[in-house]
Amino acid sequence: MSTKLVCRACGSTKLRLGFDLGMLPLANSFLSTKRARDPSPEPRYPLRMFYCNDCALIQLLDLVDRKEMFDDYAFLTATANTSMLHFDQYAEELRQRLELNTSDLVVDIGSNDGTLLKAFKKQGASVLGIEPARNVASVAIAAGIPTLNEYFGHVSVERIGRGKAKIITANNVVSHVPDLNDFIESINLLLSPKGLFAFEVPWVVDVLRHYNFDIVYHEHLSYFGFKPLSEVLVKHGLELVNLEYFPEIHGGSLRGIAAHPNIFPKQSETLGRVYRDEGRGADYSALEQFAHSVQEFRGKLRHLLLKLKREGKRIVGYGAPAKATTLLNYCSIDSSIVDYVTDTTPFKQGKFIPGVRIPIVAPDEFRKLAPDFALLLAWNFKDEIISKEREYLRSGGKFIIPFPEPKVVGSDS
Ligand code: TMP
Ligand code: ZN
């Protein structure tokens, strides 16, 4: 682990600590049964959010070795229907902006299991994924999506060829990048003169105003607003031509589209609104307010769960996203409160949530054991999950929706 108090976007050293979440385990390092039974503690690392006085980027500066985090990754895009639909529409929208043909190359950075590239392939483009997690890259390759198993950077550009990519996509990747300047510089080199770079990041204003502190974990190094992002792009010869807002994706995401300057008209109406909202919604005092509200949230959630427990209720967790590790560990919720967590991802089933060591089971177990309350840890898929679990609700089961503040939802509410 290393800590360097220098802003990842603008290089300033005027950084202020805004929120210290304490020492937490790595969010995606799910434990095997053997490891969970071993009483020796797992590695924990500081989780601290800093604010850059010069460019306003909110960021983590305690860096955990990437090998520890990404070599074997637990997230597969195709496990959630909401994401698949989102990506199909995404590919279609980009295709409408540029007429793609088979000689055009689409590169997806952080391509995961190849879900987005499959949509582009259907449209007749050549595709190439870049995915550092070995296990995930091999899922994509087996499904016919050519994939480089590496981190994107200058070396990838030389391998693929300068100016070769007509479209570059990077969803929930830019937030993970330690050397932001090298990354954007490499995008500039790879992008063809009339190409587009599309990326998605959770929007910092939503993270702060909805108290979504569980999105904070060691992999997420930057919490972007439009201002710091557009400044980095400009520094490396790119400009934002469009910006869209998706309130449903990861609690509120921005999709930016960038290009070489003066090629595409600037289209966005969102640009002005987003910029205005960030003025106060993502400054240092907003971060301080967030820290305060999150501490209150911890108290409220624990109070509710302990009260239910005293009444003899059976509580489980629903979904084991990386976010669940932050939420459960920060709120000190372990298996004395939550019996187990259910998750659809086979890779996670039979393992344990890092730190709090709560067992993860398949959804059949959830249906069989029908608990009284299910804490919705995958809250970003709330609608999908609630409609899937109508039977659970009808038979008297209730969900606890954590954000913006813990709320019980049953069939009558
Ligand atoms: P994400 O928030 O990082 O996309 O992860 C969502 C997690 O929630 C993933 O591990 C799969 C799990 N999940 C379920 O267990 N059931 C569901 O119905 C959905 C939509 C997700
Ligand atoms: Zn800065």
Image: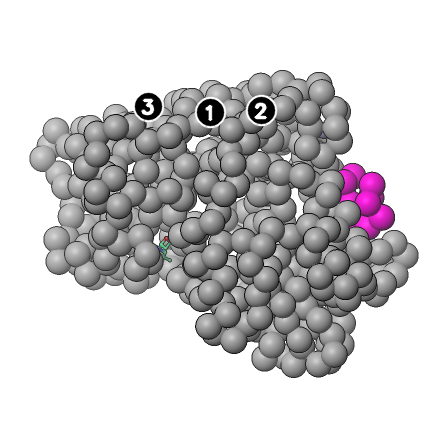
Instruction: Note whether ligand 1 is within 8 Å of mark 3.
Output: no
Amino acid type for the residue under numbered disc 2: Thr
Q: Is residue 3 visible?
A: yes
Asked which colour scheme the image uses, the reply is: one colour
Whole-percent x, y for residue 170 in the image: 63, 55
Write down the quadrant of residue 15 in the picture: top right
Q: Is residue 189 left or right of residue 360?
A: right
Residue depicted at x 69% and y 40%: 180
Nearest to N terminus: mark 2 or mark 3:
2
Tell me the tag on residue 46: 1
CA gap, disc 2 and disc 3: 30 Å
Amino acid type for the residue under numbered disc 1: Pro
Work out which residue is located at the far right of the displayed protein and give it. Answer: 262
Tell me the tag on residue 3: 2
Give neighbour class at mark 2: few <14, some 14-19, many 20+ (Cα, 10 Å).
few
Nearest to N terminus: mark 1 or mark 3:
1
Whole-percent x, y for residue 327 in the image: 37, 35
- Secondary structure under tag 1 reads strand
Q: Tell me if residue 142 is in the magenta stretch.
A: no
- In the rendered view, tell whether residue 77 sits above or below residue 7: below
Q: Is residue 34 left or right of residue 74?
A: left
Q: Nearer the viewer, residue 299 or 363?
A: 363
